[in-house]
Image (spheres, rainbow, N blue to C red):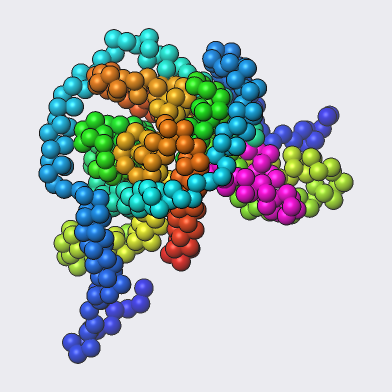
Protein backbone atom coordinates (compact mmCIF):
# COMPACT_ATOMS: atom_id res chain seq x y z
CA UNK A 1 0.00 0.00 0.00
CA UNK A 2 3.03 2.28 0.36
CA UNK A 3 3.91 2.51 -3.29
CA UNK A 4 1.37 3.93 -5.68
CA UNK A 5 2.02 1.13 -8.15
CA UNK A 6 -0.03 -1.29 -6.16
CA UNK A 7 -2.92 1.11 -5.86
CA UNK A 8 -4.43 0.20 -9.19
CA UNK A 9 -8.11 0.90 -9.25
CA UNK A 10 -10.37 0.02 -12.11
CA UNK A 11 -12.69 3.01 -11.74
CA UNK A 12 -12.15 6.61 -10.72
CA UNK A 13 -13.78 7.93 -7.57
CA UNK A 14 -16.43 9.71 -9.59
CA UNK A 15 -17.35 6.58 -11.52
CA UNK A 16 -17.58 4.63 -8.28
CA UNK A 17 -19.75 7.25 -6.63
CA UNK A 18 -22.14 7.44 -9.55
CA UNK A 19 -22.38 3.65 -9.70
CA UNK A 20 -23.12 3.37 -6.03
CA UNK A 21 -25.74 6.10 -6.37
CA UNK A 22 -27.48 4.06 -9.07
CA UNK A 23 -27.36 0.92 -6.90
CA UNK A 24 -28.71 2.87 -3.94
CA UNK A 25 -31.57 4.36 -5.95
CA UNK A 26 -32.45 0.91 -7.30
CA UNK A 27 -32.55 -0.57 -3.80
CA UNK A 28 -34.64 2.30 -2.43
CA UNK A 29 -37.06 1.96 -5.36
CA UNK A 30 -37.31 -1.78 -4.79
CA UNK A 31 -37.91 -1.51 -1.05
CA UNK A 32 -40.45 1.25 -1.53
CA UNK A 33 -42.29 -0.74 -4.21
CA UNK A 34 -42.40 -3.92 -2.16
CA UNK A 35 -43.73 -2.01 0.84
CA UNK A 36 -46.52 -0.25 -1.01
CA UNK A 37 -47.59 -2.79 -3.62
CA UNK A 38 -50.83 -4.56 -2.80
CA UNK A 39 -49.98 -8.22 -2.87
CA UNK A 40 -51.88 -10.72 -0.79
CA UNK A 41 -49.30 -13.22 0.51
CA UNK A 42 -51.81 -16.08 0.72
CA UNK A 43 -52.42 -15.77 -3.01
CA UNK A 44 -48.71 -15.93 -3.68
CA UNK A 45 -48.14 -19.11 -1.68
CA UNK A 46 -51.30 -20.60 -3.12
CA UNK A 47 -50.08 -20.02 -6.68
CA UNK A 48 -48.41 -23.43 -7.34
CA UNK A 49 -51.55 -25.35 -6.32
CA UNK A 50 -53.73 -23.09 -8.45
CA UNK A 51 -51.37 -23.41 -11.43
CA UNK A 52 -51.37 -27.20 -11.11
CA UNK A 53 -55.17 -27.17 -10.97
CA UNK A 54 -55.34 -24.98 -14.08
CA UNK A 55 -53.00 -27.22 -16.05
CA UNK A 56 -54.80 -30.36 -14.95
CA UNK A 57 -58.05 -28.91 -16.28
CA UNK A 58 -56.29 -28.05 -19.56
CA UNK A 59 -54.76 -31.43 -19.99
CA UNK A 60 -56.35 -33.67 -22.56
CA UNK A 61 -55.99 -31.11 -25.33
CA UNK A 62 -59.19 -30.87 -27.35
CA UNK A 63 -57.76 -31.53 -30.83
CA UNK A 64 -61.23 -31.86 -32.35
CA UNK A 65 -61.66 -28.15 -31.77
CA UNK A 66 -58.88 -27.30 -34.25
CA UNK A 67 -60.82 -27.73 -37.52
CA UNK A 68 -63.95 -26.12 -36.04
CA UNK A 69 -62.66 -22.66 -35.31
CA UNK A 70 -58.96 -22.55 -34.48
CA UNK A 71 -57.77 -23.06 -38.05
CA UNK A 72 -59.78 -20.21 -39.56
CA UNK A 73 -58.89 -17.89 -36.71
CA UNK A 74 -55.20 -18.71 -37.05
CA UNK A 75 -55.26 -17.85 -40.78
CA UNK A 76 -57.00 -14.60 -39.88
CA UNK A 77 -54.29 -13.87 -37.31
CA UNK A 78 -51.56 -14.39 -39.90
CA UNK A 79 -53.42 -12.15 -42.35
CA UNK A 80 -53.73 -9.44 -39.69
CA UNK A 81 -50.00 -9.63 -38.98
CA UNK A 82 -49.03 -9.53 -42.66
CA UNK A 83 -51.46 -6.80 -43.72
CA UNK A 84 -50.53 -4.77 -40.64
CA UNK A 85 -46.83 -5.05 -41.48
CA UNK A 86 -47.49 -3.98 -45.08
CA UNK A 87 -49.63 -1.04 -43.97
CA UNK A 88 -46.92 0.02 -41.53
CA UNK A 89 -44.52 0.58 -44.42
CA UNK A 90 -46.84 3.20 -45.90
CA UNK A 91 -46.45 5.32 -42.76
CA UNK A 92 -42.96 4.26 -41.70
CA UNK A 93 -41.12 4.97 -44.97
CA UNK A 94 -41.84 8.73 -45.05
CA UNK A 95 -41.19 9.03 -41.31
CA UNK A 96 -37.89 7.13 -41.60
CA UNK A 97 -36.80 9.42 -44.46
CA UNK A 98 -37.79 12.45 -42.40
CA UNK A 99 -35.89 11.09 -39.40
CA UNK A 100 -32.66 10.40 -41.32
CA UNK A 101 -30.40 13.44 -41.17
CA UNK A 102 -28.67 12.62 -44.47
CA UNK A 103 -31.95 12.72 -46.39
CA UNK A 104 -33.83 15.61 -44.82
CA UNK A 105 -31.68 18.16 -43.06
CA UNK A 106 -34.41 20.20 -41.39
CA UNK A 107 -34.41 19.98 -37.58
CA UNK A 108 -38.16 20.56 -37.51
CA UNK A 109 -38.79 17.55 -39.70
CA UNK A 110 -36.73 15.41 -37.32
CA UNK A 111 -38.73 16.53 -34.33
CA UNK A 112 -42.05 15.92 -36.03
CA UNK A 113 -40.95 12.47 -37.17
CA UNK A 114 -39.57 11.62 -33.75
CA UNK A 115 -42.81 12.69 -32.07
CA UNK A 116 -44.85 10.30 -34.21
CA UNK A 117 -42.36 7.47 -33.81
CA UNK A 118 -42.20 7.80 -30.02
CA UNK A 119 -45.95 7.99 -29.56
CA UNK A 120 -46.42 4.96 -31.78
CA UNK A 121 -43.97 2.96 -29.70
CA UNK A 122 -45.24 4.15 -26.32
CA UNK A 123 -48.80 2.99 -26.79
CA UNK A 124 -49.13 -0.76 -26.57
CA UNK A 125 -50.73 -2.68 -29.41
CA UNK A 126 -53.60 -3.70 -27.13
CA UNK A 127 -54.33 -0.05 -26.39
CA UNK A 128 -54.17 0.81 -30.08
CA UNK A 129 -56.57 -2.10 -30.64
CA UNK A 130 -58.95 -0.69 -27.99
CA UNK A 131 -58.90 2.68 -29.76
CA UNK A 132 -59.55 1.17 -33.18
CA UNK A 133 -62.26 -1.15 -31.86
CA UNK A 134 -63.96 2.00 -30.55
CA UNK A 135 -63.69 3.56 -34.01
CA UNK A 136 -64.29 0.70 -36.47
CA UNK A 137 -66.15 -1.72 -34.24
CA UNK A 138 -64.90 -5.21 -33.38
CA UNK A 139 -63.22 -7.04 -36.23
CA UNK A 140 -60.25 -7.45 -38.44
CA UNK A 141 -59.88 -3.80 -39.49
CA UNK A 142 -59.16 -2.75 -35.91
CA UNK A 143 -56.53 -5.48 -35.62
CA UNK A 144 -54.75 -4.55 -38.83
CA UNK A 145 -54.67 -0.86 -37.93
CA UNK A 146 -53.50 -1.58 -34.37
CA UNK A 147 -50.62 -3.70 -35.66
CA UNK A 148 -49.77 -1.08 -38.27
CA UNK A 149 -49.77 1.86 -35.87
CA UNK A 150 -47.80 -0.02 -33.26
CA UNK A 151 -45.09 -1.09 -35.73
CA UNK A 152 -44.55 2.36 -37.25
CA UNK A 153 -42.33 3.44 -34.37
CA UNK A 154 -40.15 0.36 -34.51
CA UNK A 155 -39.71 0.19 -38.28
CA UNK A 156 -39.41 3.96 -38.70
CA UNK A 157 -36.76 4.35 -36.02
CA UNK A 158 -34.56 1.44 -37.07
CA UNK A 159 -34.96 2.16 -40.79
CA UNK A 160 -34.01 5.79 -40.19
CA UNK A 161 -30.87 4.64 -38.40
CA UNK A 162 -30.06 2.24 -41.24
CA UNK A 163 -30.42 5.09 -43.77
CA UNK A 164 -28.10 7.29 -41.74
CA UNK A 165 -25.36 4.65 -41.84
CA UNK A 166 -25.09 4.37 -45.63
CA UNK A 167 -22.15 5.45 -47.72
CA UNK A 168 -22.89 8.86 -49.25
CA UNK A 169 -20.48 8.40 -52.20
CA UNK A 170 -22.99 6.94 -54.62
CA UNK A 171 -25.60 9.52 -53.60
CA UNK A 172 -23.17 12.29 -54.44
CA UNK A 173 -22.33 10.64 -57.76
CA UNK A 174 -26.00 10.39 -58.67
CA UNK A 175 -26.65 14.00 -57.67
CA UNK A 176 -23.65 15.14 -59.72
CA UNK A 177 -25.09 13.40 -62.78
CA UNK A 178 -28.22 15.52 -62.37
CA UNK A 179 -30.52 12.74 -61.21
CA UNK A 180 -33.92 13.77 -59.94
CA UNK A 181 -34.90 13.53 -56.28
CA UNK A 182 -36.87 10.34 -56.85
CA UNK A 183 -34.05 8.71 -58.80
CA UNK A 184 -31.58 9.48 -56.02
CA UNK A 185 -33.90 7.79 -53.53
CA UNK A 186 -34.55 4.75 -55.70
CA UNK A 187 -31.12 4.16 -57.18
CA UNK A 188 -28.90 5.67 -54.50
CA UNK A 189 -30.44 5.07 -51.09
CA UNK A 190 -32.62 2.05 -51.78
CA UNK A 191 -29.95 -0.48 -52.93
CA UNK A 192 -27.88 0.29 -49.84
CA UNK A 193 -30.65 -0.01 -47.25
CA UNK A 194 -32.43 -2.90 -48.96
CA UNK A 195 -30.90 -5.76 -46.88
CA UNK A 196 -31.50 -3.87 -43.64
CA UNK A 197 -35.02 -3.02 -44.79
CA UNK A 198 -36.03 -6.59 -45.54
CA UNK A 199 -34.47 -8.00 -42.40
CA UNK A 200 -36.25 -5.32 -40.32
CA UNK A 201 -39.60 -5.95 -41.95
CA UNK A 202 -39.27 -9.70 -41.47
CA UNK A 203 -38.26 -9.24 -37.85
CA UNK A 204 -41.25 -6.99 -37.24
CA UNK A 205 -43.54 -9.46 -38.99
CA UNK A 206 -42.34 -12.11 -36.53
CA UNK A 207 -43.18 -9.82 -33.60
CA UNK A 208 -46.52 -8.94 -35.19
CA UNK A 209 -47.52 -12.59 -35.43
CA UNK A 210 -47.12 -12.81 -31.66
CA UNK A 211 -48.97 -9.57 -31.07
CA UNK A 212 -51.86 -10.26 -33.41
CA UNK A 213 -52.50 -13.49 -31.51
CA UNK A 214 -53.61 -11.48 -28.47
CA UNK A 215 -55.44 -8.59 -30.15
CA UNK A 216 -58.62 -10.66 -30.16
CA UNK A 217 -58.85 -10.32 -26.38
CA UNK A 218 -60.15 -6.81 -26.89
CA UNK A 219 -62.21 -7.83 -29.90
CA UNK A 220 -59.85 -7.07 -32.78
CA UNK A 221 -60.12 -10.39 -34.59
CA UNK A 222 -57.92 -13.44 -34.93
CA UNK A 223 -57.17 -16.36 -32.64
CA UNK A 224 -57.48 -14.14 -29.55
CA UNK A 225 -61.26 -14.03 -29.99
CA UNK A 226 -61.44 -17.83 -29.91
CA UNK A 227 -59.11 -17.89 -26.90
CA UNK A 228 -61.17 -15.30 -25.06
CA UNK A 229 -64.48 -17.04 -25.79
CA UNK A 230 -63.28 -20.44 -24.60
CA UNK A 231 -61.78 -18.85 -21.51
CA UNK A 232 -64.98 -17.04 -20.63
CA UNK A 233 -66.83 -20.35 -20.95
CA UNK A 234 -64.15 -22.11 -18.82
CA UNK A 235 -63.49 -24.59 -21.64
CA UNK A 236 -59.89 -25.02 -20.64
CA UNK A 237 -59.19 -27.91 -23.00
CA UNK A 238 -60.07 -25.63 -25.90
CA UNK A 239 -57.91 -22.90 -24.38
CA UNK A 240 -54.95 -25.27 -24.40
CA UNK A 241 -55.68 -26.12 -28.03
CA UNK A 242 -55.58 -22.43 -28.97
CA UNK A 243 -52.41 -21.91 -26.96
CA UNK A 244 -50.76 -24.86 -28.66
CA UNK A 245 -51.73 -23.48 -32.08
CA UNK A 246 -50.26 -20.08 -31.17
CA UNK A 247 -47.10 -21.75 -29.88
CA UNK A 248 -46.56 -23.74 -33.08
CA UNK A 249 -47.26 -20.80 -35.41
CA UNK A 250 -44.99 -18.45 -33.46
CA UNK A 251 -42.13 -20.98 -33.47
CA UNK A 252 -42.59 -21.61 -37.21
CA UNK A 253 -42.64 -17.88 -37.95
CA UNK A 254 -39.45 -17.41 -35.98
CA UNK A 255 -37.67 -20.27 -37.76
CA UNK A 256 -38.70 -18.93 -41.18
CA UNK A 257 -37.60 -15.40 -40.36
CA UNK A 258 -34.27 -16.48 -38.88
CA UNK A 259 -33.46 -18.54 -41.96
CA UNK A 260 -34.38 -15.81 -44.44
CA UNK A 261 -32.44 -13.21 -42.47
CA UNK A 262 -29.35 -15.41 -42.43
CA UNK A 263 -29.38 -15.45 -46.25
CA UNK A 264 -30.01 -11.70 -46.47
CA UNK A 265 -27.17 -10.53 -44.26
CA UNK B 1 -11.53 4.66 -57.90
CA UNK B 2 -10.57 3.48 -61.33
CA UNK B 3 -10.37 5.92 -64.15
CA UNK B 4 -13.55 6.13 -66.14
CA UNK B 5 -13.35 4.31 -69.44
CA UNK B 6 -14.38 6.35 -72.42
CA UNK B 7 -17.84 5.01 -73.02
CA UNK B 8 -18.57 3.51 -76.36
CA UNK B 9 -22.01 3.70 -77.82
CA UNK B 10 -21.92 0.12 -79.07
CA UNK B 11 -21.95 -2.07 -75.97
CA UNK B 12 -23.39 0.21 -73.38
CA UNK B 13 -25.41 -1.71 -70.82
CA UNK B 14 -28.29 -0.31 -68.91
CA UNK B 15 -26.79 -0.04 -65.40
CA UNK B 16 -30.21 -0.46 -63.83
CA UNK B 17 -31.41 -3.78 -65.19
CA UNK B 18 -34.89 -5.03 -64.71
CA UNK B 19 -34.85 -7.29 -61.67
CA UNK B 20 -37.20 -10.20 -62.31
CA UNK B 21 -37.08 -11.31 -58.70
CA UNK B 22 -38.40 -8.01 -57.44
CA UNK B 23 -40.98 -7.80 -60.23
CA UNK B 24 -42.37 -11.20 -59.30
CA UNK B 25 -42.36 -10.19 -55.63
CA UNK B 26 -44.46 -7.14 -56.48
CA UNK B 27 -46.92 -9.33 -58.38
CA UNK B 28 -47.12 -11.75 -55.44
CA UNK B 29 -47.74 -8.81 -53.12
CA UNK B 30 -50.62 -7.60 -55.29
CA UNK B 31 -52.16 -11.07 -55.43
CA UNK B 32 -51.82 -11.42 -51.65
CA UNK B 33 -53.55 -8.09 -51.06
CA UNK B 34 -56.49 -9.08 -53.27
CA UNK B 35 -56.71 -12.47 -51.56
CA UNK B 36 -56.52 -11.16 -48.01
CA UNK B 37 -59.02 -8.35 -48.57
CA UNK B 38 -61.46 -10.93 -49.90
CA UNK B 39 -60.72 -13.50 -47.21
CA UNK B 40 -61.26 -11.07 -44.38
CA UNK B 41 -64.19 -9.24 -45.89
CA UNK B 42 -62.60 -5.81 -45.74
CA UNK B 43 -64.53 -3.21 -47.63
CA UNK B 44 -64.06 0.50 -48.24
CA UNK B 45 -67.59 1.03 -46.98
CA UNK B 46 -66.62 0.02 -43.45
CA UNK B 47 -63.38 1.93 -43.53
CA UNK B 48 -65.02 5.14 -44.68
CA UNK B 49 -67.79 4.69 -42.09
CA UNK B 50 -65.10 4.26 -39.46
CA UNK B 51 -63.33 7.43 -40.46
CA UNK B 52 -66.47 9.37 -39.55
CA UNK B 53 -66.45 7.77 -36.11
CA UNK B 54 -62.76 8.57 -35.75
CA UNK B 55 -63.58 12.25 -36.04
CA UNK B 56 -66.26 11.94 -33.35
CA UNK B 57 -63.92 9.98 -31.08
CA UNK B 58 -61.15 12.55 -31.37
CA UNK B 59 -63.70 15.24 -30.67
CA UNK B 60 -64.67 13.50 -27.43
CA UNK B 61 -61.07 12.87 -26.43
CA UNK B 62 -60.10 16.54 -26.48
CA UNK B 63 -59.58 18.27 -24.18
CA UNK B 64 -58.14 15.50 -21.96
CA UNK B 65 -59.78 15.35 -18.57
CA UNK B 66 -57.35 15.28 -15.66
CA UNK B 67 -59.99 15.91 -12.99
CA UNK B 68 -59.76 12.35 -11.63
CA UNK B 69 -56.03 12.63 -11.08
CA UNK B 70 -56.12 10.59 -7.87
CA UNK B 71 -57.30 7.50 -9.72
CA UNK B 72 -54.69 8.17 -12.39
CA UNK B 73 -51.90 8.52 -9.84
CA UNK B 74 -52.93 5.32 -8.06
CA UNK B 75 -52.78 3.34 -11.30
CA UNK B 76 -49.53 5.01 -12.27
CA UNK B 77 -47.98 4.14 -8.90
CA UNK B 78 -49.05 0.54 -9.20
CA UNK B 79 -47.67 0.32 -12.74
CA UNK B 80 -44.34 1.72 -11.55
CA UNK B 81 -44.21 -0.74 -8.66
CA UNK B 82 -44.95 -3.66 -10.96
CA UNK B 83 -42.27 -2.51 -13.41
CA UNK B 84 -39.60 -1.99 -10.74
CA UNK B 85 -40.15 -5.22 -8.81
CA UNK B 86 -40.48 -7.37 -11.91
CA UNK B 87 -37.45 -5.81 -13.63
CA UNK B 88 -35.17 -6.34 -10.63
CA UNK B 89 -36.39 -9.87 -9.92
CA UNK B 90 -36.27 -10.74 -13.61
CA UNK B 91 -32.75 -9.34 -14.01
CA UNK B 92 -31.43 -11.32 -11.02
CA UNK B 93 -33.06 -14.55 -12.17
CA UNK B 94 -31.85 -14.11 -15.75
CA UNK B 95 -28.32 -13.44 -14.52
CA UNK B 96 -28.20 -17.04 -13.30
CA UNK B 97 -30.27 -18.52 -16.11
CA UNK B 98 -28.14 -16.75 -18.72
CA UNK B 99 -25.03 -18.23 -17.16
CA UNK B 100 -26.57 -21.70 -17.10
CA UNK B 101 -27.67 -21.38 -20.71
CA UNK B 102 -24.25 -20.35 -22.06
CA UNK B 103 -22.85 -23.30 -23.93
CA UNK B 104 -19.20 -22.41 -23.38
CA UNK B 105 -19.60 -22.26 -19.58
CA UNK B 106 -21.89 -25.18 -18.87
CA UNK B 107 -22.16 -28.79 -20.03
CA UNK B 108 -24.91 -29.68 -22.46
CA UNK B 109 -27.20 -31.30 -19.92
CA UNK B 110 -27.46 -27.97 -18.07
CA UNK B 111 -27.56 -25.56 -21.00
CA UNK B 112 -30.10 -27.36 -23.22
CA UNK B 113 -32.97 -27.51 -20.67
CA UNK B 114 -32.26 -23.94 -19.62
CA UNK B 115 -32.36 -22.74 -23.23
CA UNK B 116 -35.64 -24.56 -23.77
CA UNK B 117 -37.11 -22.93 -20.68
CA UNK B 118 -35.99 -19.49 -21.88
CA UNK B 119 -37.45 -20.16 -25.32
CA UNK B 120 -40.81 -21.07 -23.78
CA UNK B 121 -40.78 -17.85 -21.74
CA UNK B 122 -40.19 -15.91 -24.94
CA UNK B 123 -42.78 -17.54 -27.15
CA UNK B 124 -45.95 -16.39 -25.50
CA UNK B 125 -46.98 -12.79 -25.55
CA UNK B 126 -47.00 -11.21 -22.06
CA UNK B 127 -50.77 -10.81 -22.27
CA UNK B 128 -51.33 -14.55 -22.59
CA UNK B 129 -49.00 -15.22 -19.66
CA UNK B 130 -50.84 -12.50 -17.73
CA UNK B 131 -54.17 -14.25 -18.35
CA UNK B 132 -52.81 -17.53 -17.02
CA UNK B 133 -51.41 -15.81 -13.94
CA UNK B 134 -54.61 -13.87 -13.32
CA UNK B 135 -56.51 -17.14 -13.39
CA UNK B 136 -54.08 -18.78 -11.00
CA UNK B 137 -53.16 -16.03 -8.50
CA UNK B 138 -56.18 -13.79 -8.84
CA UNK B 139 -56.62 -10.19 -9.95
CA UNK B 140 -54.10 -7.59 -8.89
CA UNK B 141 -50.51 -6.54 -9.01
CA UNK B 142 -49.06 -9.96 -8.19
CA UNK B 143 -50.19 -11.42 -11.52
CA UNK B 144 -48.62 -8.45 -13.32
CA UNK B 145 -45.33 -8.86 -11.47
CA UNK B 146 -45.11 -12.59 -12.23
CA UNK B 147 -45.98 -11.98 -15.89
CA UNK B 148 -43.31 -9.38 -16.41
CA UNK B 149 -40.72 -11.51 -14.60
CA UNK B 150 -41.40 -14.26 -17.14
CA UNK B 151 -41.20 -11.76 -20.02
CA UNK B 152 -37.91 -10.35 -18.67
CA UNK B 153 -36.38 -13.81 -18.37
CA UNK B 154 -37.29 -14.57 -21.97
CA UNK B 155 -35.52 -11.46 -23.21
CA UNK B 156 -32.54 -10.79 -20.92
CA UNK B 157 -31.51 -14.39 -20.23
CA UNK B 158 -31.39 -15.16 -23.95
CA UNK B 159 -29.32 -12.12 -24.88
CA UNK B 160 -27.12 -12.53 -21.81
CA UNK B 161 -26.37 -16.15 -22.72
CA UNK B 162 -25.44 -15.04 -26.23
CA UNK B 163 -23.17 -12.33 -24.81
CA UNK B 164 -21.40 -14.87 -22.60
CA UNK B 165 -20.91 -17.19 -25.55
CA UNK B 166 -19.10 -14.41 -27.40
CA UNK B 167 -16.50 -13.62 -24.71
CA UNK B 168 -12.80 -14.18 -25.11
CA UNK B 169 -11.72 -17.34 -23.30
CA UNK B 170 -8.15 -16.13 -22.73
CA UNK B 171 -9.05 -14.28 -19.55
CA UNK B 172 -11.06 -17.23 -18.30
CA UNK B 173 -8.02 -19.43 -18.82
CA UNK B 174 -5.75 -16.94 -17.07
CA UNK B 175 -7.96 -16.76 -13.99
CA UNK B 176 -8.33 -20.55 -13.96
CA UNK B 177 -4.55 -20.93 -14.12
CA UNK B 178 -4.23 -19.06 -10.82
CA UNK B 179 -6.30 -21.79 -9.21
CA UNK B 180 -9.44 -19.71 -8.76
CA UNK B 181 -12.70 -21.39 -7.84
CA UNK B 182 -15.63 -21.54 -10.26
CA UNK B 183 -17.36 -18.55 -8.64
CA UNK B 184 -14.19 -16.48 -8.88
CA UNK B 185 -13.80 -17.40 -12.54
CA UNK B 186 -17.31 -16.12 -13.18
CA UNK B 187 -16.86 -12.98 -11.09
CA UNK B 188 -13.43 -11.91 -12.31
CA UNK B 189 -13.20 -13.16 -15.87
CA UNK B 190 -16.70 -13.51 -17.29
CA UNK B 191 -18.62 -10.69 -15.61
CA UNK B 192 -16.19 -7.85 -16.46
CA UNK B 193 -16.45 -8.79 -20.13
CA UNK B 194 -20.23 -8.87 -20.33
CA UNK B 195 -21.29 -6.41 -17.63
CA UNK B 196 -21.78 -3.36 -19.84
CA UNK B 197 -23.85 -5.31 -22.35
CA UNK B 198 -25.85 -6.76 -19.50
CA UNK B 199 -26.61 -3.24 -18.27
CA UNK B 200 -27.72 -2.40 -21.79
CA UNK B 201 -30.17 -5.31 -21.94
CA UNK B 202 -31.43 -4.61 -18.43
CA UNK B 203 -32.18 -0.95 -19.06
CA UNK B 204 -33.93 -1.89 -22.29
CA UNK B 205 -36.01 -4.42 -20.39
CA UNK B 206 -36.81 -1.86 -17.68
CA UNK B 207 -38.12 0.31 -20.48
CA UNK B 208 -40.23 -2.40 -22.00
CA UNK B 209 -41.49 -3.53 -18.59
CA UNK B 210 -42.66 0.04 -18.01
CA UNK B 211 -44.59 -0.09 -21.29
CA UNK B 212 -46.00 -3.53 -20.57
CA UNK B 213 -46.93 -2.71 -16.99
CA UNK B 214 -49.41 -0.20 -18.37
CA UNK B 215 -50.88 -2.96 -20.54
CA UNK B 216 -51.19 -6.09 -18.36
CA UNK B 217 -53.97 -4.31 -16.47
CA UNK B 218 -56.26 -4.79 -19.47
CA UNK B 219 -56.61 -8.46 -18.53
CA UNK B 220 -56.83 -7.67 -14.82
CA UNK B 221 -53.21 -7.86 -13.71
CA UNK B 222 -53.07 -4.47 -11.99
CA UNK B 223 -51.68 -1.09 -12.95
CA UNK B 224 -52.73 1.75 -15.20
CA UNK B 225 -54.05 -0.65 -17.86
CA UNK B 226 -57.01 -1.56 -15.68
CA UNK B 227 -57.90 2.11 -15.22
CA UNK B 228 -57.58 2.60 -18.98
CA UNK B 229 -59.72 -0.38 -19.82
CA UNK B 230 -62.54 0.61 -17.46
CA UNK B 231 -62.42 4.17 -18.80
CA UNK B 232 -62.85 2.71 -22.29
CA UNK B 233 -65.79 0.62 -21.20
CA UNK B 234 -67.49 3.60 -19.63
CA UNK B 235 -66.87 5.65 -22.81
CA UNK B 236 -64.95 8.25 -20.77
CA UNK B 237 -62.85 9.15 -23.77
CA UNK B 238 -61.53 12.38 -22.30
CA UNK B 239 -60.18 10.42 -19.32
CA UNK B 240 -58.74 7.88 -21.79
CA UNK B 241 -56.86 10.70 -23.49
CA UNK B 242 -55.50 11.83 -20.11
CA UNK B 243 -54.30 8.29 -19.33
CA UNK B 244 -52.67 7.93 -22.74
CA UNK B 245 -50.82 11.21 -22.29
CA UNK B 246 -49.64 10.02 -18.87
CA UNK B 247 -48.40 6.74 -20.34
CA UNK B 248 -46.46 8.53 -23.09
CA UNK B 249 -44.91 10.86 -20.50
CA UNK B 250 -44.02 7.90 -18.28
CA UNK B 251 -42.29 6.11 -21.13
CA UNK B 252 -40.34 9.19 -22.20
CA UNK B 253 -39.24 9.55 -18.56
CA UNK B 254 -38.22 5.87 -18.56
CA UNK B 255 -36.12 6.36 -21.69
CA UNK B 256 -34.41 9.33 -20.08
CA UNK B 257 -33.70 7.29 -16.95
CA UNK B 258 -32.24 4.35 -18.86
CA UNK B 259 -30.03 6.73 -20.86
CA UNK B 260 -28.67 8.08 -17.57
CA UNK B 261 -28.00 4.57 -16.22
CA UNK B 262 -26.29 3.55 -19.44
CA UNK B 263 -24.16 6.70 -19.26
CA UNK B 264 -23.06 5.89 -15.71
CA UNK B 265 -22.01 2.33 -16.54
CA UNK B 266 -20.31 3.04 -19.87
Nearer to us in this view, A37 or A159 = A37
Q: Nearer the viewer, residue B141 or B5?
A: B141
Q: Residue A134 vs residue A167: left or right? A: left
Q: Is residue A17 above or below residue B200?
A: above
Q: How many circles with numbers are drawn on the protein? A: 0
Q: Residue furthest bottom?
A: B10
Residue A141 visible somewhere in the drawing? yes
Location of residue A23 with respect to B195 vertically, above or below: above
- In the rendered image, the quadrant that contains the C terminus of chain A is bottom left
The range drawn in magenta is B94-123
At x 50%, y 20%, the residue is B140
Viewer-nearest residue: A208 or A153: A208
B158 falls in the magenta region: no
- Whether residue B253 appears in this view of the structure is no
Q: Residue furthest front?
A: A64
| Residue located 17% across and 32% down the image | B54
Side of A168 relative to A235 (left or right): left
Residue B29: % across, % down: 26, 62
> In the image shown, does B60 or B180 lie closer to the viewer?
B60
Which quadrant is home to the N terminus of chain A? top right
Q: Residue at x 23, y 88 (%)?
A: B11
User: Which quarter of the figure has residue A185?
Assistant: bottom left
Q: Position of residue B86 (x, y in %)?
A: 56, 28
- The image shows residue B87, relative to residue B174, as above or below, that is above
Residue at image location 86% in from the left, 47% down from the top: B178
Extreme-right residue of the structure: B179
Q: Is residue A44 rendered to the left or right of residue A172?
A: right
| Magenta span: chief secondary structure | helix
Instruction: Indicate the position of residue A181 as horizontal and vertical percent values.
Output: 18, 58
Quadrant assignment, res B231: top left
Residue A93: percent from the left, percent from the top?
Answer: 26, 50
Q: Is residue A255 left or right of residue A31?
A: left
Amino acid sequence: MNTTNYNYQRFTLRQKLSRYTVYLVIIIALVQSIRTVEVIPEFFFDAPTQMADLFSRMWPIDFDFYPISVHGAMIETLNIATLGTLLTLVFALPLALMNASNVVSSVWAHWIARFFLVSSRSINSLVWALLFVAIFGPGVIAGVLAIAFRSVGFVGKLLGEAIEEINMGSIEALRASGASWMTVLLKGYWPQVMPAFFSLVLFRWDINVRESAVLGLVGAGGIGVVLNDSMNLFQWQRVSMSLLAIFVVVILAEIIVVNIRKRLI
Amino acid sequence: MARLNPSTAINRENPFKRNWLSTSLWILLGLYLVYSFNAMGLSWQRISDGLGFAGKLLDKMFPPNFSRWELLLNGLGESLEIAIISSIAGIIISLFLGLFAARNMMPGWVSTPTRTFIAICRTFHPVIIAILFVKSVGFGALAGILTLIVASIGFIAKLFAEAIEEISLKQVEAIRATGASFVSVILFSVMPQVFSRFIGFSTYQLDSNLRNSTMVGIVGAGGLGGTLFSAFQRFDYDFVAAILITIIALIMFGELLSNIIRGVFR
